[in-house]
Image (cartoon, helix red, strand yellow):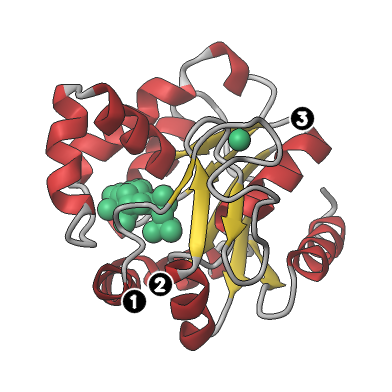
Amino acid sequence: MRLIILGAPGSGKGTTAVVLRDKYSLAHISTGDIFRSNIKAGTPLGIEAKSYIDKGQLVPDSITIGMVEARLAEDDCKAGYILDGFPRTLAQAQALDEMLAAKGEKIDAVLSIKVDDEIIKERVTTRRVCEKCGASFNVKFKPTKVEGVCDLCGGNVVQRADDTEETVAARLVTYYENTRPLIDFYQAKGLIVEGDNNVDSESCVRSIEEGLKALGI
Ligand code: ADP
Ligand code: ZN
C-alpha cells in the first residue's frame, strides 16, 4: 500500500502516520525528518534546507524531489510506504506520479487531515519532540513524565526551531498557497480520504481507516 498524508503544518500528520505505519507495516517517509537529520549532521543538503525551513518556506523542488526519489528506491519501500510531508507542491505531485508510473506503480490513497488554524497555532507552539525517536509531546496537553526527557526512549525532548509563533504563521501561508491545491488534484483522481483531527487523534485514525475500507483498501 502506498499512501500520502496531506495536512497543514502541525495538523498531526506525523502522529497519524506513525499509527498507520505500525498498523499496516509501512515505511514512514517524512521529508521534514530527513531535512532535520541532515541539518543535525551538517550535510550540504541540511545547510541549504535550513535557510528555508527557518523562514517557514518550502525547500525548493529541485532539492526535494531528488531526495524523495532516492529514498523511495530503498529496500524498505518495496512493501509499501506512507509519505508524510511530500508532495507539498503541484510540481512535486506531478514528479511523484511520473516516478511511480515509470515503475508501474501508483498511490492508493491520499489522507487529508483537517484541523482549524487556531487550534494548529496553539498546538504547534506548545509542541515538543524527542530528538532521538521523534515522539511528539505537548507541554500543555501531553507533557512528558520528566521534563525534557522522552517517556518512550529517554532521549532529549526539545522544541523544534520552526515551532515559534511567527514561523507557524509563515508555514500556514505557505501551506495555503502551495499545498492546499493538492487536495483538489487528488480529489479529481478519487483518492482523498478525510480525517478530522480537531478533537483527538484516535477518532481521526478511525475515520481514516473507515475511508480506506470504503475505497476497498
Ligand atoms: P510541518 O508539516 O509541521 O510543517 P514538516 O516536518 O513536515 O513539518 O516540515 C518542516 C519543514 O520542512 C517545512 O516547513 C518545509 O520548510 C520543509 N519541508 C518538508 N517537506 C517539504 C517538501 N515536500 N517540500 C519542500 N519543503 C519541505
Ligand atoms: Zn524518544
Q: Which residue is mark 2?
A: 180
**Residue at 40% in and 32% down:** 99
**Residue at 81% in and 68% down:** 207
> Dot 2, how many residues are within 10 Å of its Cα: few (below 14), some (14-19), or many (20+)?
some
Dot 2 amino acid type: Arg
> Dot 1, how many residues are within 10 Å of its Cα: few (below 14), some (14-19), or many (20+)?
few
178 left or right of 27? Answer: left
Whether residue 181 is visible to the viewer of this picture, yes or no, is yes
Dot 3 amino acid type: Ser
> Dot 3, how many residues are within 10 Å of its Cα: few (below 14), some (14-19), or many (20+)?
some
Residue sitting nearer the eye, 105 or 198: 198
Q: Which residue is mark 3?
A: 25
Give the x, y percent position of residue 88: 36, 56
Would you say the residues marked 1 and 2 are in contact, meaning their CB atoms lie under 8 Å apart? yes
Q: Secondary structure at mark 3?
A: loop
Which comes before the other along the chain, label 3 or label 2? 3
Q: Is residue 158 above or below residue 110?
A: above
Would you say the residues marked 3 and 2 are in contact, meaning their CB atoms lie under 8 Å apart? no
**Residue at 58% in and 62% down:** 138
Distance in Å between CA atoms under marks 1 and 2: 5 Å
Dot 1 amino acid type: Tyr
Would you say the residues marked 1 and 3 are in contact, meaning their CB atoms lie under 8 Å apart? no
| Front tag of 3 and 2 | 3
Give the x, y percent position of residue 179: 36, 66
Residue sitting nearer the eye, 171 or 182: 171
